[in-house]
Each structure stands twice: as C-alpha cells, then as structure tokens.
Image (cartoon, rainbow, N blue to C red):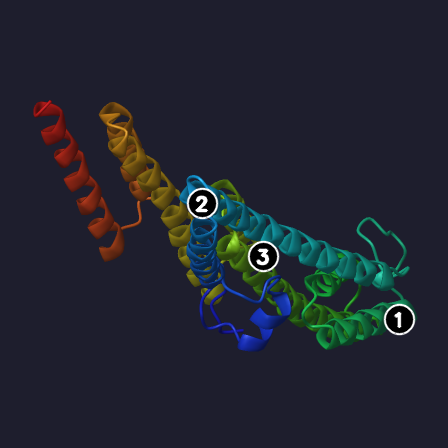
Amino acid sequence: MGRRFGSSQFTTEMNRNRRPFWVPASTYYMMTVALAAALFFVAWGILNDSLVEAPHITAGISASIFLFGAVVLREIILRRARNRLIQDQRRLERSFVSPSVHAGDSRKLTIERNAAILNDIKRKSEAARVLGKFSAGHREVFELCGDYILQNDSELKVVSASSPRLSPLLKGRTLANELHRFHMLKWAEIEVTSRTTEASTRVVSQEKIEAAQGALAVIDESLEFYPAERSLIQSRALLQDLLVSIKVSDRIEQAERAVFEKDYALAKSLYRDALFDLGRDNVQSAAREAAAARINAEIERIRILESDR
C-alpha cells in the first residue's frame, strides 16, 4: 500500500464513505455567515419600515440566533452520523465473531485444524474487503492473523523436519503474514482518514487536537509491527505537522485576542508557548521556520506596544 495516510492522495470514494458531513466546515460557515448577514439586513429593513424602536438591535439578535442555531444543527448532524457509523462497525464486529484461534490456545495445530483456521481467516478477509469502508472488519482479520502466527511459531519450534505438518504450517505462516500486513495497513488507512477528516471539520480546538492525536495513535500502533513501512513513516510526519499546526493556530488566535484586549503579558506567554510547540519534536521545515519568524515578529511588536504605554 503506497498511499500516505491522512493526505490528499486518499481516494474521493473513501473520503465520501467516511466523511460524516458532506459540506466542508469552511464552506458551511461562510454560507451561514452570508445568510445571517442577509437576514440581518432584511429584518432591519422590515422593522425600520414598521417604525420599531432600535430595529438594528432586534435584527442583530435575530441574525445571532440564526448563527447559533446553524452551529448547533451542524454539530447534531455530525454526532448522529458518527453514532450511525459506530453502530455499523459494532454490527460488523458481532458478525465476525467465531471460534477461530485465540492467543493462549494450547491445542495442537493438526493439519486439519490448521487448514480450518486458515480457511476461516481467508473467509473473513474476503468479507472485510467487500465491506472495505469499515475498519472493524480489517482489525478483526489482522488480530486473528496475529493470534495464529503466535501459535504457528510455537508449533514450528517443536515440529520435526520430517513431519507432514511442516509444509502446511510454513505455508500458513506465509499467508497469515501477508494478510496481517494488508489488513493492518488498510485498517490504519481507514481510521486515519476518518480521524483527520474529523479534525478538519471540528470547530473546537481541543476536539481537533484529540482527533489528530487519535490518528497518530493508530499510526504508532501499526509502526510497532511495521517500523520500516514508508507509508506509515510519511503519514506520521504529516500527522505531526497537522497536530502542531492545530496547536500553534489555537495559541496564535488566543494571543491575538489578548493583544486586542491589551493583555500583553498573556499574549507574549501564548506566543512563547506556540514557539515551544513548533520546536517540541525537533522537526525542522521551511513552514515551521516561517511560522516561528512571524511569531517572533509579533512578540517584538508587543514589546514596542508596551514601551509606548
């Protein structure tokens, strides 16, 4: 699998299947603000013609209520869509439950039992591919493969070279390794796509951060098994940049509000925190250096404002 998780190279179909809301957040809120502005002027005109006292205040309240309602409505739709997705995944998980092989199962892998376990894994692998947009199916398969590989390794340590079980066990291990890698990487792709989409559509910064951290946790889990997988390494770098960007943007926004309120001490503290976030993971890039330069310029500007007081 050569695609970068969490990047724009994911297919349109995958994003459509996983995206809980079909209008990007920026587009939605631009439309909402435009409609609220239109409502304000229409209401102002009607109230002004009706000789209502302070019509602009009433019109402003109406527009504000409309904006608030639009934000609440979008959050409700997002949560319901997310809940439906979770329910679908849980139903899929229940459909995958079977008496296959589990870690700690000490029964001997006979030729017949080995074949039965592999057939069960292959059947579930095919089902997970058909229901490709659900990460739970892929996770079920790679966990089953992992359990089988552990027991297979134990059997290979004691099986004799002349045993008729040796060849089926070796072939089974090769197949399990291939399916484990495929389904783990597919699971990671789907999960990271979902979580990065959530991070881009959330309004609250903390929710954005939690979604990005969840995506990073998925990549880290996969890297424990495949530390040299280039797509995972590239994805982790992209997600680290995304997480840093979210944190730094939030700090800068808070600092700008503090400057507006003339709380210069707080503003400088927030800007310094943003600089710390930029350098915390010892990753250097042109974008980070440019951001750090802008932040340092803002800190210097605040010092000038303080001296002019």
Observer-side mark, 1 or 2, equals 2
Observer-side mark, 3 or 2, equals 2
> Where 225 sits versus 300, above or below?
below
Q: Position of residue 142 (x, y in %)?
A: 70, 62
Label 1 or label 2, whichever comes before in sequence order: 2
The image quadrant where one finds the C terminus is: top left
Q: Secondary structure at mark 3?
A: helix
Front residue of 82 and 308:
308
Q: Looking at numbered disc 3 in the image, what kind of residue is underneath it?
A: Phe
Q: Position of residue 145 (x, y in %)?
A: 73, 63
The residue at the point 89 percent across, 61 percent down is: 98
Residue 153 at least partly seen: no
Give the image quarter of residue 286: bottom left
Task: Please tell me the numbered disc located at residue 225.
Answer: 3
Front residue of 158 and 286:
286
The residue at the point 26 percent across, 50 percent down is: 288
Q: Looking at numbered disc 1 in the image, what kind of residue is underneath it?
A: Ala
The residue at the point 42 percent across, 48 percent down is: 243
Residue 62 at least partly seen: yes
Residue to which mark 2 is pinned: 60
Q: Kindly check if marks 1 and 3 are in contact, taking CB atoms under 8 A apart as contact.
A: no
Residue to which mark 1 is pinned: 116
Label 3 or label 2, whichever comes before in sequence order: 2
Q: Kindly check if marks 3 and 2 are in contact, taking CB atoms under 8 A apart as contact.
A: no
